[in-house]
Amino acid sequence: MEFTSLGRTALRVSRLCLGTLNLGVRTTTEEAFTILDHALDRGINFVDTANQYGWQRYKGYTEDLLGEWFALGGERRDRVVLATKVGNPMTELPNDQGLSARNIIASCERSLRRLRTEWIDLYQMHHIDRAAPWEEVWQAMETLVRQGKVRYVGSSNFAGWHLVEAQAAARERNFLGVVSEQCVYNLITRQVELELIPAARRYGIAVLPWSPLHGGLLSGGLRKLENGEAVKTAQGRAQQALVTHGSAVAAYEKLCDAYGMDPAEVGMAWVASRPGVTAPVVGPRTLGQLDGAVRALRTALPADLTGELETLFPPVGNGGPGPEAWAW
């Protein structure tokens, strides 16, 4: 496994980040533990979750699951760079959401208990909170860093100007500020190339693309639908994208077949090779999906294939789709 620095920090992370959204929800507990152990064996040391994950059972379930896995021993916790998130609603109470100092600190304490650990390596703001001034956000994060409960702070689903604003406020306090940004990025959704990725590169912020296969749509989703094998492709983001991108996805699958390559590995290899990208966040349900993502890191796409991908899925400003309002 290849390792790289997390943005401008000295922290070394694997070039793949293991997302946990499916673990214990679309897998059994035993399967989840097997995937986590297999990831460590393959050299993946970067694991991402969120306090809200597992909401299909209860909010906090996935952190509890990871805590059980860490408790198995074998230096699992010491070997992992652990990332979680704060900000999304955890209850109906008005102060159990957002980026108030109260919620940041209280949520961290609860995450630590669920994860059965003394520290979080990367504490990520799940979304921007327009009601929270940066003075309040950074004061809370500084408190957690001083207490040794958090090592680094990251963001998720921010716009480029949010990163700039956050860093300006952090510098005034002589605080490290944001070191990573987790954003949706794949062949279909390329809006982050406009401002977010340039801002991240300028400020030394790691880019961690989530949904690199657009909810499974770029993993041979049409073929899976036809064969009745689709899981994520038949719902959510992937299903919606089929309305406007169905013909491009069909051409994409034929293109991959022509090159004798797996669509999932092509889509993952494309994201991993993009300028500014540190580590795609992959959310496997099976060991095969995890191994395919690892193989994609070693896959160099032919130049002519890359050119054809640019034609099928052009960047914004060159015939691609405009920005999606929900992201900002």
Image: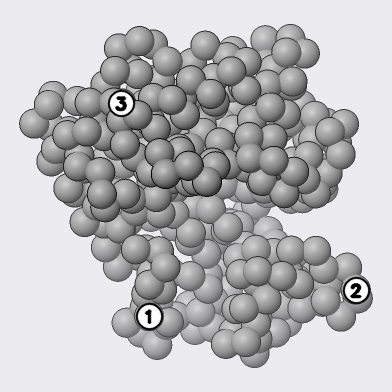
Which residue is more in the foreground, 124 or 36?
124
Residue 283 x/y as whole percent: 67, 48
- Give the mark nearest the N terminus, 2 or 1: 2
Decide: marks 1, 3 in contact (CB < 8 A)? no
Reading the image, the residue beneath label 1 is 322
Q: Amino acid at mark 1?
A: Gly
User: Is mark 3 in CB contact (under 8 Å) with mark 2?
Assistant: no
| Residue indicated by mark 2 | 228
Q: Which mark is residue 203?
A: none
- Front: mark 3 or 2: 3
* Percent position of residue 89, x then y: 50, 46
Helix, strand or loop at label 1? It is loop
Classify residue 126 as left or right of residue 43: left
Can I make out residue 20 in this image? Answer: no
Is residue 240 left or right of 68 when viewed as pictured?
left
Residue 49 visible at all: yes
Which numbered disc covers residue 141? Answer: 3
In terms of secondary structure, where does tag 3 sit? helix
Q: Is residue 246 above or below residue 61?
A: below
Amino acid, disc 3 = Met
Side (left or right) of 29 relative to 308: right
Label 1 crowd (10 A; few <14 / some 14-19 / many >=20): few
Kindly identify the residue that appears in the image at 87 percent across and 80 percent down.
226
How far apart in space, not on screen, are marks 1 and 3 (Cα)? Answer: 34 Å
Residue at mark 3 to residue at mark 2: CA–CA distance:
47 Å
Local crowd at mark 2 within 10 Å, few (<14), some, or many (≥20)? few
Residue 123 x %, y %: 43, 31
Location of residue 249 with respect to 117 vertically, above or below: below
